[in-house]
Amino acid sequence: MSINLAILVSGRGSNMEAILRSIRDGTIKGVVPKVVISNRPNVRALDVARHYNVDTQVIDDNGKKGADWEYDKRIVKCLQERDVRPDNGLVCLAGFMRIMSKEFVQLYRWRVMNIHPSLLPAFPGLNAQRQALEYGVKITGCTVHFIDEGVDTGPIILQEAVEVRDDDDVESLASRILEKEHEIYPRAVRLFAEGRLRIEGRRVRIILN
Ligand code: GRF
């Protein structure tokens, strides 16, 4: 049975594109992109999604952030209309700048992934690359994780390290991290589609094939 995929975005959509590209070129098999949902109108990600012939839907939150089940119900309705269900679906948050409500997390338990530009649990929340630079760490990176009821706290699927260079600014560091994001997010989706992720407490074990 194939997995029905929804990708939630807010802006540029480069991680979304990395996933869609991997599906199109056959690196990821058994995953059908059903819809790309944005909480903001007219963002680049929507154009890219159309370019990949994926249906798009704007569910405008008018800039109102914060976990909100009333808003998330509109997402659930859209997911269900596209047959992205808790038993056959995968929802990828890809630069989606909202916190999901606990009701949503529970409904789609272990079916929602997120990408974060730091080695969690270091530097959760906004501006992770800036946080890493200001803290002075020598190594940072990126993390793909399942979401749980916290912010950037769910079980970790994959991580990749990136060295912080003395001459880095936020932009240069973010762009090297982004390259790694584009590698690990499609890889995590692929592992999920292959049924190779086992969640045991906080740990996600990757089953060898
Ligand atoms: C990425 O850095 C991702 O880690 C963070 O938001 C950014 C989204 O970029 N959650 P894009 O929209 O995927 O290009």
Image (cartoon, rainbow, N blue to C red):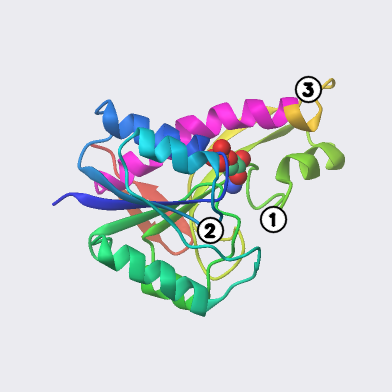
Residue at horizontal 40 percent and vertical 40 percent from the top: 49
Quarter occupied by residue 24: top left
**Few, some or many residues within 10 Å of mark 2 (<14, 14–19, 20+):** many
**Few, some or many residues within 10 Å of mark 1 (<14, 14–19, 20+):** few
Residue at horizontal 53 percent and vertical 62 percent from the top: 60
For marks 2 and 1, give the one nearer the viewer: 2
Query: Ligand 1: does it lie within 8 Å of the C-beta at label 1?
Result: no
Label 3: element kind = loop
Residue 166 picture location, percent across and down: 84, 22
Residue 39 numbered mark, or none = 2
Residue at horizontal 56 percent and vertical 47 percent from the top: 95
Residue highlighted by disc 1: 125
Kind of residue at disc 3? Arg
Kind of residue at disc 2? Asn
Label 1: element kind = loop
Q: Is residue 13 left or right of residue 168?
A: left
Magenta highlight range: 172-196
- The disc, 2 or 1, on the residue closer to the chain's N-terminal end is 2
Label 2: element kind = loop
Residue highlighted by disc 3: 165
